[in-house]
């Protein structure tokens, strides 16, 4: 009897396994999905949207901070924020970025970015995963 697939992680890993089996490629570093497979296993994202880094909202970030444990990580944005902040319609992103920096300054999260695609400027801009890591909050020192 097949196990019931419940989470987005289960579904994505099952898809990777089906593709790998159909191509006769084992789960090694030569598999093009090797890094994604391990990223999924280590992801604390509750949804595929969060995992893919699709423009998290302030509310979603606050929920992450409230419900995560130290060491939990989430991709909160995918793109090139430095360039995106220059657009006239980026008020929502500006508010979000300000909120995220506030959480960092209050020692709630650590901010990290990982380049996933090199590039130049404009439509060829580099692409980053912007990652928030929940850190231990010492309530005696940080309010």
Image (cartoon, rainbow, N blue to C red):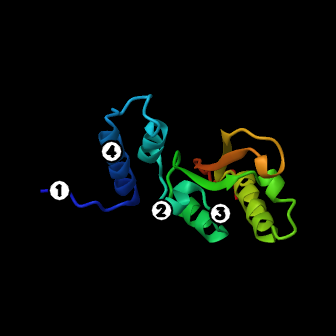
Estimate the spatial distance between the alpha carbons at disc 4 and disc 1, rounded to whole Å: 15 Å
Which mark's residue is nearer the viewer, 3 or 4? Answer: 4
Q: Which residue is mark 3?
A: 55
Q: Nearer the viewer, mark 2 or mark 1?
A: 1
Check whether the beta carbons of the residues at disc 4 and disc 1 lie within 8 A of each other.
Answer: no
Q: Quadrant of the C terminus?
A: bottom right
Q: Residue at x 44, y 28 (%)?
A: 30
Tell me the crowding category of disc 2: few under 14, some 14 to 19, or many 20 or more residues within 10 angstroms, Cα based.
Answer: few
Q: Secondary structure at mark 1?
A: loop
Q: Position of residue 107 (x, y in %)?
A: 68, 51
Residue 14 in the figure: left or right of residue 35: left
**Residue at point 55% right, 55% down?**
52
Percent across and percent down for residue 23 are: 34, 38
Dot placed on the residue nearer the N-terminal end, 3 or 2? 2
Tell me if residue 23 comes above or below residue 82 in the rendering: above
Which of marks 1 and 3 precedes in the sequence?
1
Q: Marks 2/1: CA distance?
A: 23 Å
- Please tell me whether mark 3 or mark 1 is closer to you in this view: 1
Q: Is residue 19 above or below residue 48?
A: above
The numbered mark, 3 or 4, whose residue comes first in the sequence reads 4
Give residue 75's mark.
Answer: none
Between the residue at mark 3 and the residue at mark 1, the CA separation in whole angstroms equals 35 Å
Mark 2 or 4: in front is 4
Give the x, y percent position of residue 47.
47, 62
Contact? badges 2 and 4 (CB < 8 Å): no
Residue 25 located left or right of residue 114: left
Any mark on residue 47, and which?
A: 2
Identify the residue under disc 1.
2
Q: Is residue 63 left or right of residue 92?
A: left
Classify mark 1: residues with Cα within 10 Å, few (<14), some (14-19) or many (20+): few
The residue that mark 4 highlights is 17
């Amino acid at each position: 009897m097949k196990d019931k697939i419940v989470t987005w992680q289960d579904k994505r890993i099952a898809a990777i396994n089906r593709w790998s089996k159909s191509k006769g490629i084992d789960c090694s570093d030569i598999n093009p999905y090797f890094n994604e497979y391990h990223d999924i296993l280590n992801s604390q994202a509750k949804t595929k949207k969060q995992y893919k880094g699709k423009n998290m909202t302030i509310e979603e970030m606050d929920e992450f901070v409230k419900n995560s444990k130290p060491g939990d990580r989430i991709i909160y944005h995918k793109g090139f924020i430095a360039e995106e902040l220059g657009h006239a319609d980026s008020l929502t992103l500006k508010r979000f970025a300000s909120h995220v920096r506030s959480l960092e300054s209050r020692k709630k999260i650590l901010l990290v970015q990982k380049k996933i695609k090199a590039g130049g400027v404009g439509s060829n801009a580099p692409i980053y995963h912007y990652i928030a890591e929940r850190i231990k909050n010492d309530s005696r020192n940080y309010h």
